[in-house]
Amino acid sequence: MPVPVAVKVGALALAAMGAYTWFANAIPQIESRPPQELSLEGNVPPAQLVRAGEQIFRTKGACETCHKIGERGTRAPDLGGVGGRAATRKPGTPAKQYLLESLITPGAYLVEGYPNIMPQVDRPPITLNRSEVWAMVAYLQSLGGTVDVTLEDIPPTVGAAAAGGAAAPAEVKIPGDPKAGEAVFTTKGACVACHAAGKVAGGKVGPDLSQIAKIQTPEYIMKKILDPAGLGTVSGFPPGVMPKDLGQRLTAKEYTDLVAFLLTLK
Ligand code: HEC
Ligand code: HEC
């Protein structure tokens, strides 16, 4: 059976992106992150830990872009009461362990009705360090549960990306032209009909993409354009509406430029 041209273009573009990603990752630390980091050790009073976690939730964690507390967010579940609920999510798994897992391997347990789109929070773009993950688990426990997480509960491998060194993936640089990509967004790609993106006012059929690079990986963004249904449907939005033929309609250059533009949205 001949491979349809569309699929070939899509696969080729994806392979090209994969190669760029690999290339970017092969160069250690192309861009360093701002040094503003939380570093905690030893006996930190729970109240202090919870405060730190709450702060990170609102700022560096970018959690609020997807989650609200006491109110359903657009992309993610309401985290009100999650500290209590966490103890019953997976029989035999204590609350602190479930919460840690939900941050580090979000796909291991999916809250019913939601797709597997939460990023690993100790990897780019969010890149929390080990202390910050610790504080975050404490904060989540404080939402309806009891704070009993200690630093020893967080494996030393957690936050390796933030700690730098060989384990740290460099920020992915896409060799496209963001300015040209913005034009693809508003004209040929017609993304603007359904999406707003920073300064670009757009339709509300799909999610506002103004912060997309702050909360999602380049891999997610690249795949979503070529195979929107393959990653599930963002909660709160209609399924099957995002066009499936973008990989056929865009040239490899247009696609690369478009991705470069989307990666500026943070
Ligand atoms: C791109 C959107 C997005 C971002 C950013 C995000 N999450 Fe999530 N999160 C989700 C989705 C979707 C789910 C439900 C699917 C799943 O279980 O993985 C989820 C699930 C969770 C759960 C499990 C909730 C339960 O009831 O069992 C916790 C806890 C959580 N997220 C915490 C966080 C924290 C803390 C941050 C910030 C450091 C964060 N998330 C950032 C989308 C996101
Ligand atoms: C006809 C409307 C429509 C058009 C045109 C469209 N999209 Fe979408 N898009 C959606 C909808 C609806 C969703 C959310 C549901 C889903 O996940 O399929 C979405 C989801 C997304 C997401 C995931 C957002 C998130 O929060 O995780 C990205 C990224 C995206 N679109 C990019 C694009 C780009 C880039 C274009 C143009 C090349 C485009 N879309 C064109 C409707 C559209």
Image: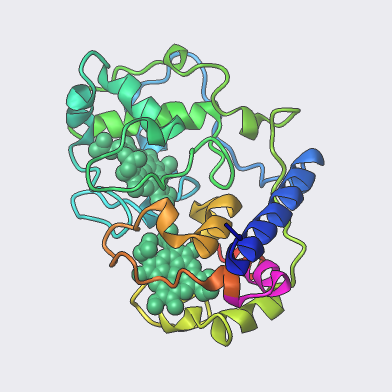
Q: Position of residue 123 (x, y in %)?
A: 57, 38
Residue drawn at x 75%, y 52% is: 20
Q: Count the marks: how many?
A: 0
In this orientation, does residue 28 appear? no
In what quadrant of the picture does the C terminus appear?
Answer: bottom right
Answer whether residue 253 is magenta in the image.
Answer: yes
In the figure, 1 relative to 51: above or below? below
Q: Residue at x 65, y 69 (%)?
A: 255
Q: Position of residue 258 (x, y in %)?
A: 63, 71
Is 252 displayed left or right of 159 in the figure?
A: right
Secondary structure mostly seen in the magenta stretch = helix
* 241 left or right of 70 in image: right
Ligand 2 in which quarter: bottom left
Residue visible at 33% across and 56% down in the picture:
75
Q: Which residues are magenta?
A: 249-258
Task: Please determine whether, in this image, residue 29 is positioned above or below residue 68.
Answer: above
Q: How is the image coloured?
A: rainbow
* Quadrant including the N terminus: bottom right
